[in-house]
Amino acid sequence: MKLRILTTVLVTSLSLIQPSVGIGQKRKRSKQTKPAIERWYLFSSPDGDFTLSFPQKPTLKDVGAGPLTDVRELEFITPEGMRFSANFHDIGGNPNAIESNRWMPQLEQVLSDFDRSQGLRVVQMHRVTPNTVEAEVWQPVTETNSTINYLRRSIIRRARVYTLACGWLVNEKPVDNSAVCRRFFDSMRLTSNSNHSSHSRRKK
């Protein structure tokens, strides 16, 4: 189970990396204008297991196969180049088991090692709660010769993994522990209404 959970997190991390390629350089000279956040859109999960607020309505899409189900992703990018995303998928097993609701003790080190092996610079990584790990990373985008900065929060609950990310697609623009990202992360509400039998299975 631990190996399976680890694989899930790494797949999720990789899916976060891919959408940013090709955007960083394009927005390199964008003005450092704060994104409009006065009115936020409340997204409700199609499976009834969470709600999450975005500055505006996000796009929901499948981004690839996970260990058990397809990885579904929500994404919204502001005109100024700030990206908000969340992806989620199931890992199987008993939703009530400890390992389905709590990260393994060494996860921070494993994730840090993996991120660095992919060329990312890890600024910090820490455990927020037993089932939540948060990190700040700088990611080089070789295709555009740029580097982007974002915060990432990985959550496991009832045999489902959620990964939130928030940061700039603007070259070398720091997140600086953005209050906007905190608002995004803290808006997530996990509910008890989840029906795992309705979760999307991997497409054949």
Image (cartoon, rainbow, N blue to C red):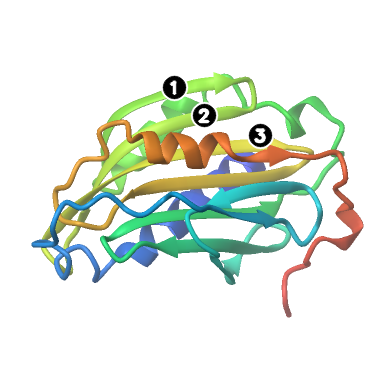
Which residue ends up furthest to the bottom in the rendered image?
A: 204
Q: How many marks?
A: 3
Q: Name the image quarter holding the N terminus.
A: top right
Q: Is residue 147 visible?
A: yes
Name the residue located 76 percent from the left edge and 42 percent from the top edge. 159
Circle 2 — which element? strand
Q: Which badge, 2 or 1, comes first in the chain's sequence?
A: 1
Q: Is 116 on the left-hand or right-hand side of 53?
A: left
Q: Is 157 on the left-hand or right-hand side of 139?
A: right
Q: Nearer the viewer, mark 3 or mark 2?
A: 2
Q: Which residue is denoted by mark 2 in the rendering?
A: 133
Q: Which badge, 3 or 1, comes first in the chain's sequence?
A: 3
Q: Is residue 11 visible?
A: no
Q: Which residue is denoted by mark 1 in the rendering?
A: 126
Residue type at tag 1: His
Name the residue located 89 percent from the left edge and 52 percent from the top edge. 195
Image quarter for residue 26? Answer: bottom left
Q: Which badge, 3 or 2, comes first in the chain's sequence?
A: 3
Residue type at tag 2: Val
Q: Name the image quarter holding the C terminus.
A: bottom right
Q: Nearer the viewer, mark 3 or mark 1?
A: 1
Instruction: Tell me the CA gap for discs 2 and 1.
Output: 6 Å
Q: Which residue is denoted by mark 3 in the rendering?
A: 2
Query: Alpha-carbon neighbours of circle 2 within 10 Å: few (<14), some, or many (≥20)?
Result: many
Where 168 falls versus 157 (above or below)?
below
Where 166 falls versus 15 (above or below)?
above
Do the CB atoms of the residues marked 2 and 1 lie less than 8 Å apart? yes
Name the residue located 76 percent from the left edge and 34 percent from the top edge. 100
Q: Position of residue 56 (x, y in %)?
A: 50, 61
Q: Position of residue 47 (x, y in %)?
A: 80, 57
